[in-house]
Amino acid sequence: MRRAERLFRLVRELRSRHVSRAEDLADYFEMSVRTIYRDIAHLQASGLPIEGEAGVGYILRPGFDLPAMTFTFEQLDALAIGLSFVEAAADKALSEAAREVRAKVQGALPDPEKRKLENAPLFASRRQGAASPMLQIVRRAIREAQVLQLRYDDAAGQPTDRRVWPLAIWAFTDGWLFVGWCELREDFRAFRLDRISALEESGDTFADDPAKNLQAYLSTRFLAERRNP
């Protein structure tokens, strides 16, 4: 969990309790007491009216509330269409996360009856339906810098076994692909998910290499587009 999300949840929990002991909060969030102390100290230093001390308990004084999210109608439309696309096109875990985001943002909006996101009349669909469960593996591998082992069929249907450093995912109207550094070709390659017949995490990790990372790929792609406008 990112720190910003953790702090947001901590404030929400403090607001819902009369007195909060650090030990109880640590059990609730499944983290160490030391982390709770550090987060509360950070919130107090940021000006939040939290009273109390270690070993006694904490109280968030009445009258404080989290600021409401404010979006224009155009921004809400953009969110609605984007979330609808993810719900329709992504793997199961990402689709569910998109629905949770929709409900979370809707609950934080001012004037929720006027600014609707949860039931917005804006939809997205795709001919091929939801993405393969392999997309979740690729997303996790990118986050954790995990080398992927895959069997890939080229346009002629010829399979090759590859070890790839995954760097980024592209979503298209008709499918998904990911870009990475291919150890077999010793170059950047794009892999369509529908041409992958086997995919697994190798258990190996890769380090950030300035010649093989996402920035290097984007620079290479930009130069290629400049040469062939």
Image: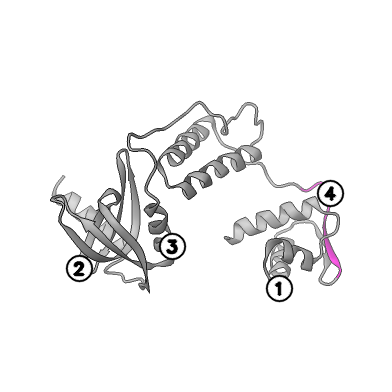
Q: Which mark is residue 143?
A: 3
Residue ID for mark 4? 62
Secondary element at tag 4? loop
Tell which circle, 2 or 1, labels the residue nearer the N-terminal end.
1
The amino acid beneath tag 3 is Arg
Q: At which x and y percent is residue 159?
A: 18, 58
Tell which circle, 1 or 3, labels the residue nearer the N-terminal end.
1
Q: At which x and y percent is residue 106?
A: 61, 37
Q: Considering depth in this image, is 74 or 183 the residue closer to the camera?
A: 183
Q: CA distance from mark 2 to mark 1?
A: 46 Å
The amino acid beneath tag 4 is Pro
Q: Considering depth in this image, is 29 or 105 the residue closer to the camera?
A: 29
Residue ID for mark 1? 34
Q: Nearer the viewer, mark 3 or mark 2?
A: 2
Q: Which mark is residue 184?
A: 2
Tell which circle, 1 or 4, labels the residue nearer the N-terminal end.
1
Q: CA distance from mark 1 to mark 3?
A: 26 Å
Snapshot quadrant of residue 204: bottom left
Q: CA distance from mark 3 to mark 4?
A: 39 Å
